[in-house]
Image (cartoon, helix red, strand yellow):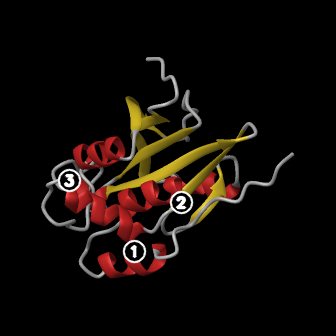
């Protein structure tokens, strides 16, 4: 069995800390960077070059989709219906949208979803699923860390099953 060595972008922690100081984050670009094996700043530069406003420190799903397309990805959007466990996508790679419960209420906070949303990357390697979080780096989906990740106030709301345009993706 091959050991999995997931790529962590060289500037991941630096970019995460820089945008965290503005109440934002780089989880979306970090997921793309980890999957592509490039720096987070390279993804942010691509993001800006697509005609969006300057990267604002949060990642609307439409901008993530457009950026993925610019890297040659096809994707299928899948609703996860408030899943408290990590899904098993049909492709070997997926970007998951994690939604967090607002701390002051018992309702899921949709109005400021950007401030309560986080993206993680999932990759399958030899039948095992690995998760990349830009704050936690790589961990196995069946690990204690993964079991505790969604415990309490978080759930998977949706995900994008990814494939490169040279691969065949069935809906």
Question: Mark 3 or mark 1, which is nearer the start of the sequence?
Answer: 1
- Does dot 3 land on a helix, a strand or a loop? loop
> Which badge, 1 or 2, comes first in the chain's sequence?
1
Answer few, some or many: residues within 10 Å of disc 2's Cα (few below 14, many 20 plus, some between 14 and 19).
some
Q: Residues within 10 Å of mark 3 (few under 14, many from 20)?
A: few
Q: Is residue 45 above or below residue 68?
A: below
How far is disc 2 from disc 3 in space, using C-alphas?
Answer: 20 Å
Q: Residue at x 65, y 41 (%)?
A: 124
Looking at the figure, which quarter contains the C terminus? top left
Using the image as rendered, state which of residue 142 and residue 127 is in the foreground: 127
* Residue of label 2: 37
Q: Residue at x 23, y 43 (%)?
A: 62
Residue topped by disc 1? 16
Name the secondary structure under disc 2: loop
Q: Which residue occupies the extreme right position in the image?
A: 1
Question: How far across and how far down the image is residue 97, in percent?
Answer: 39, 46
Where is residue 56 shown, x and y percent of the image?
19, 67
How many residues crowd around disc 1 within 10 Å: few (fewer than 14), some, or many (20 or more)? Answer: some
Instruction: Estimate the spatial distance between the alpha carbons at disc 1 and disc 3, rounded to whole Å.
Output: 22 Å
Q: Which residue is mark 3?
A: 50
**Residue displayed at 33% across by 81% down:** 18
Under tag 1, what secondary structure? helix
Q: Residue furthest top?
A: 171
Q: Is residue 130 left or right of residue 149?
A: right
Q: Is residue 102 left or right of residue 164?
A: left
Image coords of residue 157 (percent x, y): 38, 39
Residue 111 % position (x, y): 15, 51
Q: CA distance from mark 1 to mark 2?
A: 17 Å
The relative height of residue 140 versus residue 13 in the rendered view (above or below) is: above
């Amino acid at each position: 069995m091959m050991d999995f060595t997931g790529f962590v972008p060289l500037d991941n922690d630096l970019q995460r800390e820089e945008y965290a100081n503005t109440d934002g984050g780089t989880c979306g670009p970090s997921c793309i960077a980890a999957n592509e094996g490039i720096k987070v700043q390279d993804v942010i530069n691509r993001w800006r070059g697509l005609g969006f406003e300057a990267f604002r420190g949060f990642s609307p799903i439409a901008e993530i989709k457009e950026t993925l397309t610019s890297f040659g990805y096809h994707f299928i959007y899948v609703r996860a219906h408030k899943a408290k466990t990590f899904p098993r996508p049909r492709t070997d790679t997926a970007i998951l949208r994690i939604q967090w419960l607002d701390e002051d209420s018992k309702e899921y906070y949709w109005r400021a979803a950007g401030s309560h949303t986080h993206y993680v990357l999932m990759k399958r390697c030899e039948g095992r699923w690995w998760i990349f979080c830009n704050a936690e780096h790589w961990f196995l989906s069946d690990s204690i860390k993964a079991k505790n990740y969604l415990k309490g106030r978080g759930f998977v709301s949706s995900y994008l099953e990814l494939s490169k345009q040279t691969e065949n993706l069935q809906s």
